[in-house]
Image: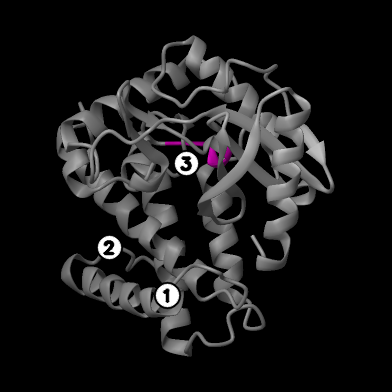
Amino acid sequence: MQASQVPRAVAAAMSVVSSLGLPADDAIVLHDSNKLTLRLLPCDVLARVAPVAQQVARFELDLARRLAAAGCPVAALDPRVEPRVHERDGFVVTLWTYYAPVAPGEAAPADYADALARLHAGMRGLDVPTPHFTDRVEQAQRLVADRDRTPALADPDRELLGDTLRGLRRVIGEHGGAEQLLHGEPHPGNLLTTANGPLFIDLETCCRGPVAFDLAHAPEAVGEHYPGADQDLLRACRLLVLAMITAWRWDRDDLFPDGRRLGTEWLGRIRAERDRDGLGHHG
């Protein structure tokens, strides 16, 4: 979120919570990306705040309720208030349960894999209209092709990313296999380690595709514990996801901390992977 928006976003969240009869005297910023995640005290509610124009809060809220009802490992909405999307001063605010972290570091790979497998099992039973994962690949391809939006991307690197995205999208599509509703970005930043076990958050990125696309966002050891994971497909998906997030780091409007250094580092990894085993060399 733009720095100039943060004070208004915090004020909007505190206003909403106070209007619901929960005491909110202080706000701690837990995460700031496309939306602001706040811990409000002393009521201890987790508020997620986004500009009205950039949000899919209602979709995320409805999906979270359905997944929780199916017993999936997802963070719960705050049970003290009605589950709804609140609008205030140009922002949307949703209220969630705050989970105190129980241990430093990431979840053990076996626990991570088990939680993701249970999430996928619950998602298979839901009929939810969502984009296909290839829609997000296309977004990355358009970004790479747009010199105005990625002016610092050198031509050889632009060609590398474009070829990799195009080639791996085709390889994964031709692989076939089952597709289903996915989290979309179940990386460690979207997994909470709680007293209730690992819980996934941030469901706004849901899409349809092969389970391997989700697994590609998790640490490599997680894929070794996930039941029935197609390791060849997973390797292709990992390189595809790396190419996508590399493209986003070269967006002139990218706000990711240290993003340009990471983008350069990841270009080197993509080039090394392609040279090693030929993934992405498909025109």
CA separation in Å, label 1 and label 3: 23 Å
Q: Residue at x 41, y 18 (%)?
A: 72
Do the numbered discs 1 and 3 sit on residues whose CB atoms are within 8 Å?
no
Work out how far the residue at label 3 is from the one at label 2, CA to CA, in angstroms.
22 Å
User: Which residue is labeled 3 in the image?
Assistant: 184
Between 101 and 242, the one lying in front of the other is 101
Which residue occupies 17% across, 36% down?
A: 108
Q: Which label number is shown at residue 258? A: 1
In percent of the image, x 23 and y 37: which residue is there?
A: 103
Left or right of 167 in this view: 84: right
Element type at mark 2: loop
Residue type marked 1: Asp
* Amino acid type at mark 3: Gly
Report the front residue among 17 and 194.
Answer: 17
| Residue sitting farthest toward the right | 89
Q: Is residue 263 magenta?
A: no
Task: Name the amino acid type tagged 2.
Answer: Leu
Label 3 or label 2, whichever lies nearer to me, is 3
Check the image and report above or below for 191 versus 251. above
Under circle 1, the secondary element is loop
Q: Which mark is residue 279?
A: 2
What residue span does the magenta drawing correspond to? 204-209
